[in-house]
């Protein structure tokens, strides 16, 4: 019987998912965690066949947790669940090794069917999200531009960013300037907002 791990920071949602999937005769929910940085340890301890990961969790995002699982437990199937249908998230999830990308409000039967397909070696992607991702195109930001924007999100000064990222202030300014330009934003705060909205951070 396939063994499932659930990672979701909202306890009501996690417990509802566990209850719904537990009703399926061919699934067993063997572990539940509320933080992204608990996923890998739980997967090592409980040896699930499928990990269902929320994207936005404390400690580590679902996408970061998926990448860690994919590196260390490559046989484990990964399903990313999201409330946020942001196109950039889909691309990031697939690059991190996810086998499926679904919205949380999908019917329970659809989620169960997706888990079975993933176990059979298929990839499952919510069609609406797939169409949006294709329409949006690739993330224009480089890894370093993303790092600087992410670090700038809490309002840090260029000097603070330079210290945090071990860069010169001039380099920080250049990365921020390029990111703002690529996102057609007026300032760094707007650039952060645009990049978050599109799932590019």
Image (cartoon, rainbow, N blue to C red):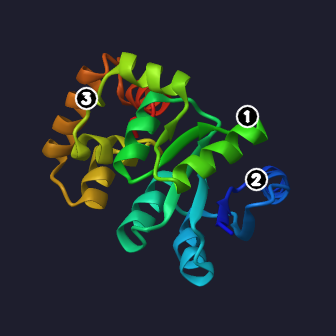
Secondary structure at badge 2 equals loop
**Which of the marked residues, 1 or 3, is nearer the chain's N terminus?**
1
Residue 97, visible in the rendered structure: yes
Q: Tell me the crowding category of disc 1: few under 14, some 14 to 19, or many 20 or more residues within 10 angstroms, Cα based.
A: few
Say above or below: 29 vs 9: below
Residue highlighted by disc 1: 105
- Say few, some or many: other residues with alpha carbon within 10 Å of mark 2 (under 14 / 14 to 19 / 20 or more): few
Q: Which mark is residue 140?
A: 3
Q: Quadrant of residue 32?
A: bottom right
Residue 113 vs 96, above or below: the answer is above
Name the quadrant of the C terminus. top left
On the image, the x and y values in percent for residue 174 come to 16, 36
| Residue tagged 2 | 10
Residue drawn at (55%, 63%) of the image: 59
* Separation of residues labelled 1 and 2 (CA atoms): 14 Å
Dot 3: what SS? loop
Q: Residue at x 50, y 29 (%)?
A: 86
In the image, taking residue 94 as reference, residue 142 lies left or right, namely: left
Residue 40's tag is none
Tag 3: Cα neighbours inside 10 Å, few (<14), some, or many (≥20)?
few
Q: Position of residue 132 (x, y in %)?
A: 46, 20
Ranked by sequence position, the earlier of labels 3 and 2 is: 2
Residue 175 in picture, x, y percent from top left: 20, 38
Q: Dots 1 and 2: beta carbons under 8 Å?
A: no
- Asked if residue 54 shows in the view, the reply is no
Residue at x-position 65% and y-position 36%: 83
Measured from the top left, where is residue 54 in percent x and y?
Answer: 61, 50
Q: Is residue 57 left or right of residue 31?
A: left
Considering only order in the chain, which callout, 2 or 1, is on the residue closer to the N terminus?
2
- Give the spatial CA distance, label 1 vs label 3: 29 Å
The one nearer the camera, 122 or 158, is: 122
């Amino acid at each position: 019987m396939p063994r499932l791990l659930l990672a979701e920071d909202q306890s009501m949602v996690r417990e509802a998912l566990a209850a719904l999937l537990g009703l399926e005769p061919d699934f067993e929910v063997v572990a539940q965690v509320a933080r992204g940085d608990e996923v890998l340890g739980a997967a090592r301890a409980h040896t699930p066949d499928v990990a269902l990961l929320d994207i936005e969790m404390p400690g580590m995002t679902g996408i970061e947790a998926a990448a860690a699982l994919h590196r260390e437990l490559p046989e484990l199937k990964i399903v990313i669940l999201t409330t946020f249908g942001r196109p950039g998230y889909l691309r990031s999830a697939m690059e991190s090794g996810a086998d499926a990308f679904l919205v949380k409000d999908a019917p329970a039967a659809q989620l169960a069917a997706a888990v079975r397909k993933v176990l059979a070696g298929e990839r499952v992607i919510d069609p609406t999200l797939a169409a949006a991702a294709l329409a949006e195109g690739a993330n224009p930001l480089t890894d370093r531009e993303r790092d600087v924007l992410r670090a700038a999100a809490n309002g840090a000064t260029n000097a603070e960013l330079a210290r945090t990222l071990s860069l010169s202030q001039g380099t920080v300014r250049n990365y921020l300037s390029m990111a703002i330009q690529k996102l057609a934003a007026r300032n760094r705060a707007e650039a952060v907002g645009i990049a978050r909205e599109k799932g590019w951070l």
